[in-house]
Image: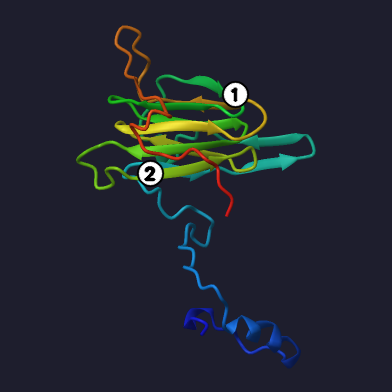
Amino acid sequence: MMPKELEMPPLPAALVRRYELADDVRPLADRDMPTVNAAGERLETGIEGVVHVRQHAHPDHRGRLTEVVNFNSSFWDEPVVHAYCFAIRPGRIKGWGMHLKQADRYFLCAGRVRVVLHDGRVRSPTFGAFAQFHFTDESPALLLIPPGVWHADQNWGDTDAVFMNFPTRAYDAAAPDKFRIDPHSGAIPFDWTLRDG
């Protein structure tokens, strides 16, 4: 039986059978949970303190323009004190990495990347949780990764992926705020297979 919230308004008689056949479907399955609101904004990030902001590309016949830094946005609640660009080769994973004294603020300039986060903060309400964010040229976004959250970036495209990072602290060459775990070590249990479905 069709759930009440999926019931259709009255249809012309010629279209009724199209939908009647879907009243009983096998095998049954769980319905997807909502992931975006009516404006297309992500409902939640899955990890406390992570901020994901979808940006808008403005294309025309010459190319496209995408705003990255706008200090009127609450995403930039800490000043820009340092910025750098990094690339990931096709098929490679960069990570796991984590910082204790800074947040990372990512923007993908080019490529196709899955950014996977793992909350390692014992006192966090989302301790142990994973979250995934998919970035492409067609879906620009900003991602704030708080201190204590492990992150790894997997290039699933066929060209170099290029990110800009605007960390909340400048790099300290004498005492780098960077901790690393091999993504294939099993220390953070994550299956890097990209699955269909």
The percent coordinates of residue 154 (x first, y second) are 52, 32
Q: In the rendering, which numbered label is found on residue 163?
A: none
Residue type marked 2: Phe
Judged left or right of residue 113, residue 185 is: left
Q: Quadrant of residue 163?
A: top right
Vertically, is 26 above or below 104? Answer: below
Residue at 31%, 7% (x, y): give it.
174
Q: Nearer the viewer, residue 69 or 49?
A: 49
The image quadrant where one finds the C terminus is: bottom right
Sequence-first disc among 1 and 2? 1
Q: CA distance from mark 1 to mark 2?
A: 23 Å
Residue type marked 1: Arg
Residue at 72%, 90% (x, y): give it.
12
Q: What kind of element bears circle 1?
A: loop
Q: What kind of element bears circle 2?
A: strand
Residue at label 2?
130
Q: Quadrant of residue 20?
A: bottom right
Residue at label 1?
89
Vertically, is 6 above or below 63? Answer: below
The percent coordinates of residue 62 (x first, y second) are 78, 34
Residue at 44%, 38% (x, y): give it.
116
Judged left or right of residue 49, residue 90 is: right
Judged left or right of residue 185, residue 94 is: right
The percent coordinates of residue 143 (x first, y second) are 45, 37
Judged left or right of residue 152, residue 149 is: left
Q: Residue furthest right?
A: 61
Q: How is the image coloured?
A: rainbow
Q: Residue furthest bottom?
A: 13
Q: Quadrant of residue 140?
A: top right
Q: Residues within 10 Å of mark 1 (few under 14, many from 20)?
A: some
